Image (cartoon, grey):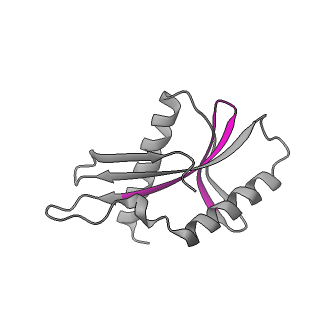
């Protein structure tokens, strides 16, 4: 992954985390590693434990790429489920929760880093 893509991803994850906190969510972990890979954000939305996958893209001048959220296909969804299960299995200090949810957030930024599009799908998969 290029440095530019890493910076884009980090900026999008920071933006998403800030918006979640402003909406009253409690962030439990960011960029949390398991033996299967990394979870972007783990948070509590009320009493719901939420695993949030963040995808970022840049807005092209003419006909831009498809929305970033579309890159979370069935294979990636299975991987995130496995990551979530591994994260929970490795924790002894899980907060009280009544449900588990897997959300997807797509962020499109322009060349100046301004948000062009923000799409949050709750219970995405």
What is the quadrant of the C terminus in the image? bottom right
Residue 12 makes an appearance in the image: yes
Instruction: Please say whether residue 42 is one of the residues in the magenta stretch.
Output: yes
Given residues 79 and 91, the one toward you in this image is 79
Point out the residue furthest to the right here.
92
Given residues 59 and 123, the one toward you in this image is 123
Name the residue: 24% across, 58% down: 59
The magenta region covers: 38-56
What is the quadrant of the N terminus in the image? bottom left
Name the residue: 79% across, 41% down: 94
- The quarter of the displayed image where residue 55 is located: bottom left
Instruction: Decide whether the magenta segment is chiefly helix, strand or loop.
Output: strand
As drawn, 14 above or below 3: above
Relative side of 113 to 74, left or right: left
Q: How many marks?
A: 0
Name the residue: 50% across, 68% down: 73
Relative side of 6 to 114, left or right: right
Residue 7 makes an appearance in the image: no
Name the residue: 58% across, 32% down: 25
- Residue 67 % position (x, y): 34, 60
- Residue 90 % position (x, y): 81, 55
Relative side of 110 to 46, left or right: left
Instruction: Please say whether residue 41 is one of the residues in the magenta stretch.
Output: yes
- Residue 33 % position (x, y): 67, 59
């Amino acid at each position: 992954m290029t440095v530019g893509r890493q910076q884009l991803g980090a900026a999008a994850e920071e933006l998403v985390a800030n918006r979640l906190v402003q909406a009253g969510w409690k962030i439990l972990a960011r960029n949390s590693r398991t033996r299967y890979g990394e979870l972007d954000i783990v948070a509590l939305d009320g009493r719901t434990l939420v695993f949030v996958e963040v995808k970022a893209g840049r807005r092209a001048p003419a006909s831009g790429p498809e929305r970033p959220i579309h890159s979370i296909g069935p294979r990636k969804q299975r991987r995130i489920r496995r990551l979530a299960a591994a994260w929970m299995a490795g924790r002894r200090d899980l907060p009280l929760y009544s449900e588990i949810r897997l959300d997807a957030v797509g962020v499109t930024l322009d060349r100046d880093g301004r948000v062009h599009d923000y799409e949050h799908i709750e219970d995405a998969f």
